[in-house]
Image (tube, rainbow, N blue to C red):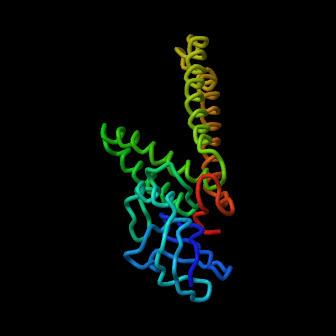
Amino acid sequence: MRGEILSFDDVSGTGLISGDDGARYSFDRSSIQSGGGVVRAGARVDFVAEGDQAAQIVVITATAAAHSALDSLDTQVTGFDWKTLLFSFEGRIRRSHFWIGWLILLGVSVVAGWIPVLGALISLLLIWPNLAISVKRLHDMGQTGWLVVVPWVVSIVGMFVGFGMIGMSAVMNAAALENEDPAAILALIGPAFGLLALILLVGLGFLLWIGLTDSQKGDNRFGPNPKGE
């Protein structure tokens, strides 16, 4: 039977084919025969239907857009394409892939925290993959990737405001601080801790929002649905 690839997720290696019989068939990377053309949405394929699954898939033709997309993603492996997952800002990723990437980056960050000097550099480098997985998750939800700057702006502005509050309190209560007055110390750091808690809540809320919201059904302007739905 012949049909057309509706969607294909490079990260999970799964996709969906619309058969010429009008039915839809799921497939994974292992079902694709070697030596064929580009495995991308829009490609014409020949395959064997096994229930609702497509097997022995041979790519016959692919659109020009599919060829262009393949050129930009030259690393395909069985399972995850780690390069695309962690470093590309293009396309969409599902919730499970986001959490896998996030946990990996968290683990690296924890280890880096124990390494003097070099750990700080590693932490800075981790900003890029953190942004990449967050942007692609926003794309999957149908949202603009620019929303990823919200928690960063809140954190940066909050830090400046917090330091300013501590500085002003220290100047206004200098005498009480010299006497180690507990009430003065609490007045100095209390608002700053409250602001820090608010910043952490914003960051946690954003993380849960992009990490738990389901994928937008079907294709959107950022690419095909990574779950093939």
Residue 13, percent from left and from top: 48, 70
The residue at the point 58 percent across, 38 percent down is 149
Furthest-bottom residue in this view: 50
Where is residue 229, by image quadrant?
Answer: bottom right
Return the x and y of residue 93 as percentages of the image width and height: 55, 58
Quarter of the rendering occupied by the N terminus: bottom right
- Of 88 and 171, which appears nearest the observer? 88
Using the rendered view, name the quadrant where residue 71 is placed: bottom left
Residue lying at 35% horizontally and 39% vertically, measured from the top left? 121
Q: For this rendering, which residue is in front, 2 or 172? A: 2
Residue shown at the point (57%, 64%) measured from the top left: 226
65 vs 166: above or below? below
- Residue 85: x, y in percent? 46, 56
* 71 in relation to 191, above or below: below
Give the vertical position of 146 relative to 33 (above or below).
above
- Percent of width and height locating residue 125: 39, 42
Tell me: residue 36, above or below residue 159: below
- Number of on-image labels: 0
Task: Name the foreground residue: 77 vs 98.
Answer: 77
